[in-house]
Image (tube, rainbow, N blue to C red):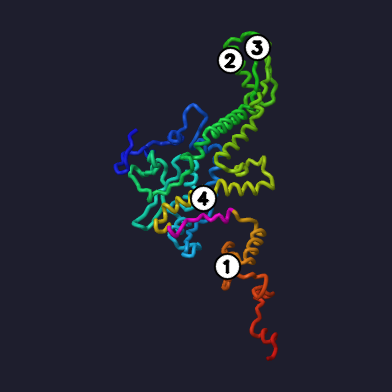
C-alpha cells in the first residue's frame, strides 16, 4: 500500500460512492466484520432491541443536557456566557432542519455504532459560525494517517480541514457495536429461532414412523393430510389420525432448548457489557431491587455516560470555538438534571449549603431556575442572627422606629 505525505494527498479510501447501502453491507465491510460468522452490524444490529435500547439511552441522555458556555475569569472562577453564539446555536437550531438536541443525539449514536464515529460539517463565513450540518455517511468520509493517526476529511471528494469538521469517536478505533458484533449476532440468531418456534408452534413437534415403506407418493399424501389437519393456530389440539401402522413420536427438548430463555438473558447482559450500561437501563430487571436501582443509575452516569460527555465537550469545543476562545472558554453539558435528587432531598441540601455559606441564595435559586433577588448575593446564614426572617418575611434587624422604642429616651 502506497503512503502519501500530507503535502501531496492522493485519493483516500472513502465511502462517498453513488451506491445504495440499505442493508448496511458497506458499513459491515468498513467495520472489518468477516463473513462466515454470526457477527452483524449496521441496521441489522439495531433491530436487536437490547442494542437499540443501549444506543438510545446513551445518546438521548447526552442530548437532553443543557449546553452552557463557561468563561473562566482571572481569579479562576467560571461564569456562564449566555450570549455566546455557539451556545445560542446549540440551544436552538444548528441548521434550518436540525435542532441542537438532534445533532448531539445523532453524533453520539453514530459514535456508538460506526467505527469512524460521528461526523458533521461546520459551515463558517469568515470567522462567523453559520450552521452545523450532519451529512449522511455516503457523503462525508475520514481517513487516518497510518503512523500518527491524524485524520483527513473530505465531503463529496473535496478535502476539508479539521477545523471544519465536528468529529466524535469512541475508544479502540472501533465502535461498541463492532466490538460486540458476535454477541449481537448470537442474540439476533436466538430471536430468529424464537420467532420460528412460535410461528410453527401449532404443528406437533415430533416424527411419524412407519413400519413399511410408503413410497414417494404415499409420503406426499401423508404430509398433505397431516398439514391439513394440524397446520395453523385454529387446528391446535386436534386428534392426529395415522394409518398403516404409523406411529407419532413426540420430540423432547434438549438441554440447549430448555435453557433458551437463560441464554437470551445472558446475551442481553453481554450487550450491556459492550456498551457499559447497567442491565436495568435496557429493562432487564431480574437483579434490580429498590436498594440497588439508584446505585446502578449512578454507575451509568459515572462509568458509562461521563466518558461520552467528555468526548462530546472536547469535540464541540475543538470544532466550534477558536483557539483563542478555548483559552478562557469551554463547552459544558450540564449534568445537574441527571444527578438531581427528589425535591425534599434537593431542598435539604440547598438549605444546608446556604446555611454553611458555601453558596449564596441567588446561586441556589439559579439551581432551581428561579430569578435572583436583591441582596441574594450575600453569604449569610438565614437561620441565625439578624438575617433570620420574621413572620412578615422580613429580617429581624430592627428598623429605626423600633430601635428608638427599644433603646428608650436618651
State which tag comes first along the sequence, 1 or 4: 4
Residue 183 picture quarter: top right
Dot 1 alpha-carbon crowd within 10 angstroms: few under 14, some 14 to 19, many 20 or more: many
- CA–CA distance between discs 1 and 3? 88 Å
Is residue 334 on the magenta stretch?
A: yes
Residue topped by disc 2: 220
Q: SS at mark 2?
A: helix
Q: SS at mark 3?
A: loop
Residue topped by disc 3: 210
Residue 278 in the image, given as x and y percentages of width and height: 60, 43
Question: Closer to the camera: disc 2 or disc 4?
Answer: 4
Decide: is 95 above or below 38: below
Which quadrant of the rendered structure holds the N terminus? top left
Residue at the image point whose x is 69% and y is 86% from the top: 407
Of residues 279 and 134, the one drawn nearer to the viewer in this rendering = 279
Q: SS at mark 1?
A: helix
The reply to whether the C-beta atoms of the residues labelled 1 and 4 are less than 8 Å apart is no
Is residue 340 on the magenta stretch?
A: no
State which tag comes first along the sequence, 2 or 4: 2
Question: Closer to the camera: disc 2 or disc 1?
Answer: 1
Residue topped by disc 1: 362
- CA–CA distance between discs 2 and 4? 63 Å
The reply to whether the C-beta atoms of the residues labelled 2 and 4 are less than 8 Å apart is no
Residue at the image point whose x is 63% and y is 56% from the top: 341
Residue topped by disc 4: 309
Residue 34 in the image, given as x and y percentages of width and height: 47, 30
Q: Residue furthest left?
A: 8
- Which residues are drawn in magenta? 327-338
Of residues 22 and 349, the one drawn nearer to the viewer in this rendering = 349
- Residue 49 seen anywhere in this rendered image of the structure: no
Amino acid at each position: 500500500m502506497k503512503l502519501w505525505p500530507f503535502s501531496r494527498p492522493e485519493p483516500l479510501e472513502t465511502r462517498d460512492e453513488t451506491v445504495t447501502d440499505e442493508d448496511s453491507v458497506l458499513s459491515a465491510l468498513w467495520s472489518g466484520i468477516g463473513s462466515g460468522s454470526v457477527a452483524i452490524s449496521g441496521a441489522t444490529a439495531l433491530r436487536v432491541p437490547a442494542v437499540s435500547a443501549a444506543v438510545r439511552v446513551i445518546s438521548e441522555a447526552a442530548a437532553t443536557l443543557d449546553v452552557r458556555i463557561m468563561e473562566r475569569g482571572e481569579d479562576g472562577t467560571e461564569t456562564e456566557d449566555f450570549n455566546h453564539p455557539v451556545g445560542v446555536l446549540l440551544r436552538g437550531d444548528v441548521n434550518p432542519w436540525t435542532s441542537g438536541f438532534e445533532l448531539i443525539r445523532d453524533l453520539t449514536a453514530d459514535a456508538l455504532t460506526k467505527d469512524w464515529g460521528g461526523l458533521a460539517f461546520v459551515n463558517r463565513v469568515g470567522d462567523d459560525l453559520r450552521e452545523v450540518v450532519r451529512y449522511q455517511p455516503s457523503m462525508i468520509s475520514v481517513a487516518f494517517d497510518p503512523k500518527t493517526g491524524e485524520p483527513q476529511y473530505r465531503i463529496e471528494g473535496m478535502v476539508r480541514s479539521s477545523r471544519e469538521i465536528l468529529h466524535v469517536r469512541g475508544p479502540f478505533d472501533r465502535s461498541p457495536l463492532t466490538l460486540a458484533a458476535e454477541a449481537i449476532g448470537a442474540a439476533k440468531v436466538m430471536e430468529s429461532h424464537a420467532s420460528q418456534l412460535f410461528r410453527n408452534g401449532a404443528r406437533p413437534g415430533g416424527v411419524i414412523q412407519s413400519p413399511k415403506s410408503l413410497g414417494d407418493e404415499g409420503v406426499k399424501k401423508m404430509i398433505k393430510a397431516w398439514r391439513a389437519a394440524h397446520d395453523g393456530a385454529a387446528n391446535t389440539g386436534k386428534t392426529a389420525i395415522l394409518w398403516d401402522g404409523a406411529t407419532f413420536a413426540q420430540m423432547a427438548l434438549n438441554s440447549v432448548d430448555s435453557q433458551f430463555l437463560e441464554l437470551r438473558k445472558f446475551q442481553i447482559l453481554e450487550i450491556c457489557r459492550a456498551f457499559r450500561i447497567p442491565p436495568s437501563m435496557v429493562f432487564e430487571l431480574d437483579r434490580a431491587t429498590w436498594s440497588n436501582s439508584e446505585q446502578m443509575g449512578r454507575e451509568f452516569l459515572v462509568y458509562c455516560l461521563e466518558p461520552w460527555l467528555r468526548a462530546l465537550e472536547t469535540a464541540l469545543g475543538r470544532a466550534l470555538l477558536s483557539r483563542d476562545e478555548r483559552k478562557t472558554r469551554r463547552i459544558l453539558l450540564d449534568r445537574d438534571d441527571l444527578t438531581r435528587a427528589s425535591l425534599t432531598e434537593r431542598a435539604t441540601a440547598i438549605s444546608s449549603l446556604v446555611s454553611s455559606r458555601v453558596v449564596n441564595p441567588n446561586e441556589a435559586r439559579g439551581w432551581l431556575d428561579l430569578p435572583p433577588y436583591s441582596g441574594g448575593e450575600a453569604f449569610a446564614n438565614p437561620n441565625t442572627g439578624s438575617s433570620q426572617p420574621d413572620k412578615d418575611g422580613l429580617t429581624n434587624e430592627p428598623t429605626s422606629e423600633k430601635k428608638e422604642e427599644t433603646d428608650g429616651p436618651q
